[in-house]
Amino acid sequence: MPTKTVAGTTVDVNEEGFFENPDQWTEDMAPELARDDGIDALTDRHWEVINFMRKEYFEKGTGPTVRVLGKASGVSVKELYELFPKGPAKTAARIAGIPKPHGCI
Amino acid sequence: MAERIVVLGGGTGGTLTANRLRRALPDAHITVVDQDDRHVYQPGLLFVPFGLTHPEDIVRPRGRQLHRGIDYRECPIDHVDLATDTVVLADGSSLQYDVVVVATGSVLLPEETEGLTGPGWMEKVFTFYSLEGAAALEASLTRFERGRLVVNVVDMPIKCPVAPLEFCFLADWYLRERGVRDAVELTYVTPLDGAFTKPVASARLAGLLAAKGVELVTEFNTGEVDGGAGRLIGYDGREVPFDLAVVVPLHGGAEFVGRSPGLGDELNFVPADEHTLQARAKANVFVIGDASNLPVSKAGSVTHFEGEVLVENVKRFLGAEPLDASYDGHANCFIETGFNKALLIDFNYDTEPLPGHFPAQVGLPLLKESRLNHLGKLMFQWFYWHSLLPGRDIPGIGAEMPAAGKETGAAQNH
């Protein structure tokens, strides 16, 4: 399994950079993970989404889709794309240190 | 006292469940509720725009598909009160139950996409996922001779995830038959990162799109449909121009689920155990078919395979026995590819669609175009009304996925 060093700590990731073990994630890793995805500074709105991602993951066993994010996170789909231009569900999952969302069938 | 079972929905799942329950529990009092009396053979919708079938040929009365001894109530559902085991109907009456089965499928939500139902809707922007939409599209398609035809899936989950691909294949065939294919640009626009969700099938289907000259646009999340100007606008700013758009709208669970506290998720689908089909909400609630949030395709074959386990579990629950956790995620779909040919795919939770033969080494070819599969798809409509809905097993096709004819070495299973 590939590993990656974030904020001085070695963590397990998959080949697309998603955390394999969300318990290895700490808040101070988020800014560095965000920069890897082209986001220079995390705002409070980013953090709302990141925290929501982790909460959903621990409750449901998978990260939410963009649609669910738009309905339940308090951030509209339009704004989600402004915050995470490369795709909110995947990017926010990577920054939040949770595995790749199962998404769709 | 006779057990009271209420089945919400008289479509594929509700009908086959009620009919199977009638046989499994002859003394139970079974009531099926639906808001209308039009049972649509939904796999037929794909063929309507091409004039290969007609709306009146794929609709039958719901009540008539139910065995004798089953009550049928035609009334919209207001909500389910889990605390008191009561279904409240829109006319104010209510039904008490010992077990309730949610079989209300999914609904189309075109109004949730900006502009989709605005200018151009039903004029140059259509869906074939409703009877009205499919019929209107037929009228428009017969006049379509040149320009850009775009097929777009707004977001998953959708019913029958292969249907929009089949639409592309059939459109290619239809336009060729009419001699206008060269004047039409055909484009498939999907939110997925490939033609389909599962890797081996995705590669094969992408190959078929390419062979038929269908352009594939991936990871496109439709934010707006601008029917006036004729363009899809993605949330990321990309645009896809069209002269005629065939859009598969967002899907959600039935509205009453949202009005029933604790029953559904954000999209009104009902969370349930993947193997027993018991709802997470309460032990006496079961879910079948498109209404659930299970990680399976929303498809009639899935519903059919779930039926056997579901009915067994309703019986076991009423008998206070442990549930049978044997539903394996089995799905099986014919994929029409035009020119009287079709592919067949067969998969479950653990095994993606693989090449080979179904159900064993001698059988229908899997993931490969053949005339036999096309005949299978056409024959299936007869089986649907005469075998699947009455709750009989279809010869040779069991609830569990057969592994015998599959080339499992062809790919890593997930």
Image (spheres, rainbow, N blue to C red):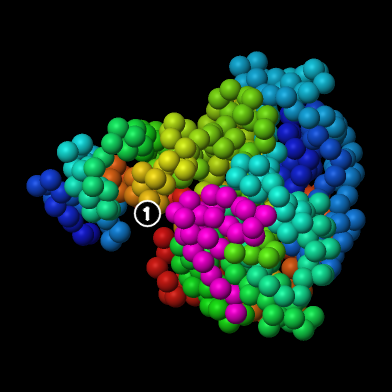
> Is residue B211 on the magenta stretch?
no
Residue B24 visible? The answer is no
Magenta residues, as a range?
Answer: B213-240
Relative to B28, is B309 above or below? below
In percent of width and height, residue B362 lies at 63, 78
Which chain does the residue under circle 1 lie in?
Answer: A
Which is nearer the eye, B170 or A48? A48
**Amino acid carrying mark 1 in the image:** Lys
In the picture, the quarter occupied by the C terminus of chain B is: bottom left
Q: Residue at x 70, y 20 (%)?
A: B86
Which residue is painted at 37% across and 54% down in the image? A86
Q: Of B326 and B184, which appears nearest the observer?
A: B184
Q: Is residue B236 magenta?
A: yes
A63, B352: nearer the viewer: A63
Residue B287 in view in this figure: yes
Left or right for B231, reference B33: left
Lateral position of residue B334 relative to residue A69, left or right? right
Report x, y in % for residue B218: 49, 64
Residue placed under numbered mark 1 in the picture: A86
Q: Residues within 10 Å of mark 1 (few under 14, many from 20)?
A: some
In the rendered image of this protein, does residue B264 appear above or below residue B334? above
| Residue at x 36%, y 43% (from the top left corner) | A83
Q: Which residue is outermost to the left?
A: A8
- Residue extending farthest front: B229
Left or right of B217 on screen, residue B169:
right
The N terminus of chain B - image quarter: top right
Q: Position of residue B386 (x, y in %)?
A: 84, 56
Image quarter for residue B164? bottom right
